[in-house]
Amino acid sequence: MKLKTNIPDLKAPFYIHHKQQLLSMGSCFAQEMGQRLAKSKFNITINPFGILYNPLIIKQLLENILKGAHFDEAAIATRDEYNFHYQAHSRFYAATKSELLNNLGQIQAKLTTLLPKVDVLLLTFGTAWGYELKATRQLVANCHKMPNTLFDKVLIEAHQIESEFGELFRALQSVNPSLRVLLTVSPVKHLKDGMVENTLSKSILRYAAHLIAKRHDFVYYYPAFEILQDDLRDYRFYKADLCHPNALATEYIWEHFTRNFFDATTNNLYKQWVGLYQQIQHRPLIPDHPSYKLQLWQLKEQLENMADHLEVSQELDHIKQLLGD
C-alpha cells in the first residue's frame, strides 16, 4: 500500500566536495543547511550578511560586491541608541554609524576576494514579499522593528527575479566562469503574511527558480520545498509554530541531499567524520581512567590521518590538550 508520494533521487549534474569553496545565502533554511555542511567539515561561508528572505536583496548585495559599491550611510536606521543597516540583518549593529559601516565593509572586502573562488553558491529564496522604504523606494533586507509607516509592502514578480538574477549571473561568471549554483525555495511558511499570501509568494518563487534554472545551465534547482510539502506532507514534521521544519524533517531533507550531491569519496569522508565527531563529544565518567586515555590516543591518530582530507586542526588541538601534550 502506497501511503505517501516520494521525491525520487535526482540526477545531480555535479557533486559537492570537501575541498571546494561553498557560499550559502538566503533564508533560515539556507542557514540550517549551511550549518550542517559546516558541521560536516565542508569549507563554507554562511549568510555573511545574515539571514535574507527576499531574493532581490541577495542579488543587490552580491552585485554591490562585484561593482565595489559600499554600504550607503543613508540606509542606516537608528533605534534604541544603536545603528542598523536596512541592507543587512539585525545581528549587525553598532553604537556609531562609522563602526557599523566599517564592520559591513570588512565583510564586503572578504567576499570580494572569495567570490572568484566559490565553486558552489547555494541560494535559498524565502519570500516574494518585501518592504520598500518610502523615503528612497529601496527594498530593505530587514525593517529592524522601525515603524511600519516608513515602509510599503510590495510583491516581487517572477519575471523580475529571473531578469535581475540573469544580470547577476552574467557578472558572476565574468569573474568566476566555473561557478555552479544550487537554487532552492525555502519550505518555511511565512504565515505572518497570511495563508493565501504565503501560497502566492511560494508560487512566484518556484516559478522564478524554474525560469532561472531553465535559462542558465550552471544553475540547478533542488526540491527542498517539494520534499516537505509533498513527500512529508504532515504537520508532525513542523515545529510548534507550524511554520518551520522540525529536526526530523530537516534530517530527512539532509539525507536526501547527501545521497544526491555526495559522491562515494565525499560520502565516505562524511561518514568517517560523523563517527569521529561522536567520539569527540563523548564525556567519560572517569576522565583519568587508562581506557579513556587509550581512546584519546586512538582518536588523535585517526584525526591526524584525516587531516590531509578535512580541516580538523581545532579538534586535534582539543584532543592534545586532553592528553596533556
Image (cartoon, helix red, strand yellow):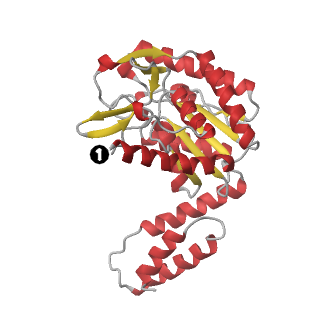
Q: Is residue 235 left or right of residue 17?
A: left
In percent of width and height, residue 120 lies at 66, 44
**In the image shown, does 25 or 57 lie closer to the viewer?**
57
Q: Quadrant of the N terminus?
A: top right
In percent of width and height, residue 235 lies at 41, 28
In percent of width and height, residue 140 lies at 44, 27
Element type at mark 1:
loop
On screen, residue 314 above or below 175: below
Q: Is residue 252 visible?
A: yes
In percent of width and height, residue 133 lies at 40, 21
Res. 94 image quadrant: top left
- The type of residue carrying mark 1 is Ala
Q: Is residue 251 visible?
A: no
Q: Residue at x 45, y 45 (%)?
A: 104
Q: Which residue extends farthest left?
A: 80
Q: Is residue 261 left or right of residue 82?
A: right
Q: Residue at x 76, y 42 (%)?
A: 177
On screen, residue 245 above or below 268: above
On screen, residue 106 above or below 3: below
Q: Is residue 256 left or right of residue 240?
A: right
The residue indicated by pointer 1 is: 95
Q: Residue at x 49, y 69 (%)?
A: 314
On screen, residue 145 above or below 152: below
**In the image shown, does 282 or 319 lie closer to the viewer?**
319
- What is the count of numbered marks? 1
Q: Is residue 131 left or right of residue 117?
A: left
**In the image shown, does 52 or 286 lie closer to the viewer?**
52
